[in-house]
Amino acid sequence: MKFTNSPMQEVSLNNRKIFIKRDDLLDINFSGNKARKFYYFYKNDFKNVKKLISYGSAQANSLYSMSVLAKLRNWDLDFYVKHISSYLKENPQGNYKASLENAANIIEKDVEDLNDYISKNLLQKDVLYIQEGGRVFEASFGIKILAQEIKDWQIKNNINDMIVCLPSGTGTTALFLQKYLDCEVITCSCVGKDDYLKKQFFMLESDENNHPLILKSTKNYHFGKLYLEFYEMYKKLKKETKIEFDLLYDPLGFITLINSKYFESDKTIVYIHQGGLLGNQSMIKRYERKINFKK
């Protein structure tokens, strides 16, 4: 299983050269940022653990990767969600379906704060708890390796003025990359507003000097909602770069990057492809239904 040393690929976007760190080409079950975030839990021994517990969305990339991790380690997985749509229950697909096939226990729990519920009620000696999206200190183990791969490529290619870009959910990958890289790391808020993302940073790193720069979005987007400009960016990226990107995070990541001063600068841009392509199965169907409805 390949969890490290993803290739770097040069592409052209809007007639501008950028480089894509192809973490989507890591192991198909642990591709993208989850391969980096969960690498610690794959490499290290947890003799007393029998169950993995986490929470998030029923279509979360982390759900599928955790289901694979639990299967590899012979653990049970209890993954808590606030709601599963009746459509998804009746038509399992994407991360949800693949996780069920890996014997994940996906549990609906209608509480305001799932982290608080799990912390107060479910933590036992034989339980490993990973917070939503892999927002844990242990994620730094794999992300530090990613940072070193980028540094090695930078030195090998004699690149001095570099900037690393990636979109953020919890911001864990961006945060630890900024901590371990000498260059500037820029990101954008995909799940909540900028103050939400900043709060996530402070949960893992009190020194604001180690926080990445959050680029301002030109529009207030709501996570998981369909935006035709996202679908158009997805198609544009596929056409111009010949690479498929995720439909939840990467369209906003590229829209924000292209509209920033950095895209017009002479800096070498490295964009981190964070995987998540399994979720495109359901997202593309949703976009097709929306587009047909509008027609």
Image (cartoon, grey):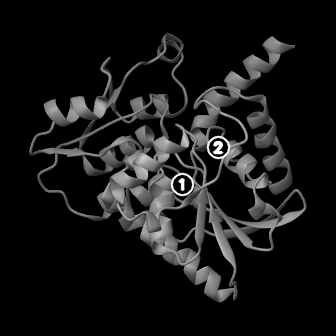
Q: Nearer the N terminus, badge 1 or badge 2? A: 1
The picture places residue 158, in percent across and down from the top left corner, at: 69, 89
Mark number, residue 32: 1
Q: Position of residue 211 (x, y in %)?
A: 48, 62
The number of callouts visible is 2
Q: Is residue 285 left or right of residue 31?
A: right
Amino acid type at mark 1: Gly
Count neighbours of disc 1 (C-alpha within 10 A) and say few if under 14, some if 14 to 19, many if 20 or more. Answer: many
Q: Looking at the image, is 246 positioned above or below residue 117? A: below
In what element is the residue under mark 1? loop
Q: Secondary structure at mark 2?
A: loop
Determine contact: label 1, label 2, CB under 8 Å: yes
Quadrant of the image containing the N terminus: bottom left
Quarter the C terminus occupies: top right
Given residues 8 and 166, the one toward you in this image is 166
Q: Quadrant of residue 290?
A: top right
Give the amino acid at mark 2.
Asp
Dot 2: within a 10 Å radius of its alpha carbon, few (fewer than 14), some, or many (20 or more) residues?
A: some
3D distance between C-alphas at marks 1 and 2: 10 Å
Residue at figure coordinates x 53%, y 61% from the top left: 212
Would you place residue 137 above or below residue 116 in this image?
below
Furthest residue toward left: 125
Residue at 60% over, 29% down: 222
Task: Give me the residue at 30% from left, 45% from top.
Answer: 70
Query: Is residue 187 depicted above or below 193 in this figure?
Result: below
> Which residue is rendered at x = 50% and y = 34% of the image?
95
According to the picture, the residue beneath numbered tag 2 turns out to be 246
Q: In x, y percent, where is residue 253? A: 67, 49
